[in-house]
Image: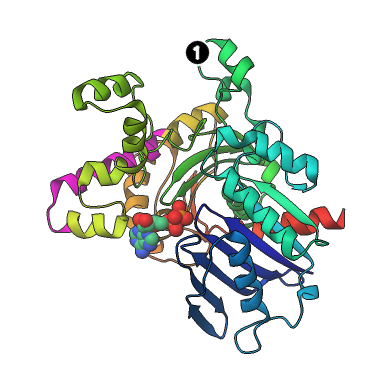
Amino acid sequence: MNVLVINCGSSSLKYQLLNMQNESVLAKGICERIGIDGRLVHERPEGKYEATPAMPDHAAAMSVVLEALLDPNHGVIKSKDEIHAIGHRVVHGGETFTQSILIDEKVEAAVEACSDLAPLHNPPNLIGIRACRQHMPNLPQVGVFDTAFHQTMPAKAYLYAVDHKLYDKHKIRRYGFHGTSHKYVSQQAAELLNRPLADLKLVTCHLGNGASVCAVQGGESIDTSMGLTPLEGLAMGTRSGDLDPALITFIMEKENLTAQEVLDMLNKKSGMLGLSGVGSDFRDLATAAESGNQKALDALEVFAYRVAGYVGRYAAAMNGLDAVIFTAGIGENDSYIRAKVCEYLTWFGVSLNQEENKKRGKALDISNSEAKVRVLVIPTNEELMIARDTKKILEA
Ligand code: ADP
């Protein structure tokens, strides 16, 4: 079975075609600048192909993807019939979706209903679903939600301590994101540790441009650091993460800004970028820190301190801890941040092997042999998880 995985953003469409017999990637790529001009980067094991076809909308981008997959030179299939199902990343499933689901009209309407919880993400996800239907009306499509994995959180973890009416009326609560990644790496961790997932207390740290931490007990999310929106929790590339909510009106007054402008500032100009003034990419921060830039050093300290703080909090939430898992761009590549975080965790029983910590690119236990709490690096693979769910649903 070949599964096409689609991740549709407001002006981009990422795709990956997987052969689910052996879980190999046949081709992958991205359409960018949709609605502006259009740029395609298409990759297969044999090499990369780039082009600038017109992409006035997502349906046009979807045609470009299909043409690339079918192209006699850089394509990987001969006919659309070689695509057997489509799996979509959908950001917000609210309280409606606790797992992946075959998309029908009812599901689509429910995704639409969740749009006010994720106004930037759900509408393009829906556009992607509709564009695929337009091109391949008979193919089954599956929705895989970023929030679904966290629907197992207990009320004490998902409730904000505000008037309960706000939850009753508007479903204002914590949802969490990156669920597909947290679920994938926790399953991989159980394999690497050679122990049943049901017995494990894990903290998974998805540290990318957006970053979140999750407490995974017995394979279920029991708490996570992002909330109603992805702004809560860790300090991130450009997001502030946790702060005193009174800051918002304070900044509005002091800087003469509207609420929306402050929110924009907290989402796009804060975090590592705001603190350092250097940028949001950890490679740039490291370069600046090495040349003695104190603000960049401070930013990295804030980042690691927050991650470690959440690990400690979740060890308390689970009353135990078997392993800490690092994943995504920073988690998989930044040995400095991993070492910084682990320095705070020695009391818990973490003991980092400095040599192993330098390696990258594959799933690895980077602890010393005597460590009571293991530290793992596990490359995430959200596309594979989406394809697996899609296959599972079709076979059921
Ligand atoms: P997203 O999917 O959220 O865009 P990624 O998981 O791809 O993010 O992570 C992107 C981030 O990972 C970059 O902003 C950068 O800070 C960090 N990163 C990538 N490679 C490295 C590296 N070699 N060393 C340190 N940080 C890295």
The reply to whether residue 9 is in sight is yes
Please name the residue that numbered disc 1 is placed on.
162
> Residue 382 appears in which quarter of the rendering?
bottom right
Q: In the image shown, does 57 or 107 lie closer to the viewer?
A: 57
- Is residue 18 shown above or below 188? below
Magenta-drawn stretch, dominant element (helix, strand or loop):
helix
How is the structure coloured here? rainbow
Instruction: Specify the amino acid type for callout 1.
Output: Val
The image shows residue 267 at horizontal and vertical percentages of 37, 39
| Residue found at x 44% / y 41% | 349
The image shows residue 66 at horizontal and vertical percentages of 66, 73
| Residue found at x 39% / y 38% | 234
- Residue 292 placement, left or right of 170: left
Q: In the image shown, does 197 or 241 lie closer to the viewer?
A: 241
- Residue 299 placement, left or right of 151: left
> Residue 360 appears in which quarter of the rendering?
bottom left
Quarter of the displayed picture in which ligand 1 can be seen: bottom left
- Is residue 150 shown above or below 252? below
Q: Quadrant of the N terminus?
A: bottom right
- Residue 328 placement, left or right of 63: left
What is the count of numbered marks? 1
- Residue 368 placement, left or right of 248: right
The reply to whether residue 97 is in sight is no
Q: Is residue 298 magenta?
A: yes
Direction right: furthest residue: 396
> Residue 147 appears in which quarter of the rendering?
top right
| Residue found at x 61% / y 89% | 73
Q: In the image shown, does 80 or 335 lie closer to the viewer?
A: 80
Secondary-structure class at tag 1: loop
Dot 1 surroundings within 10 Å: few (below 14), some, or many (20 or more)?
few
The image shows residue 285 at horizontal and vertical percentages of 24, 54
Magenta extent: 290-309
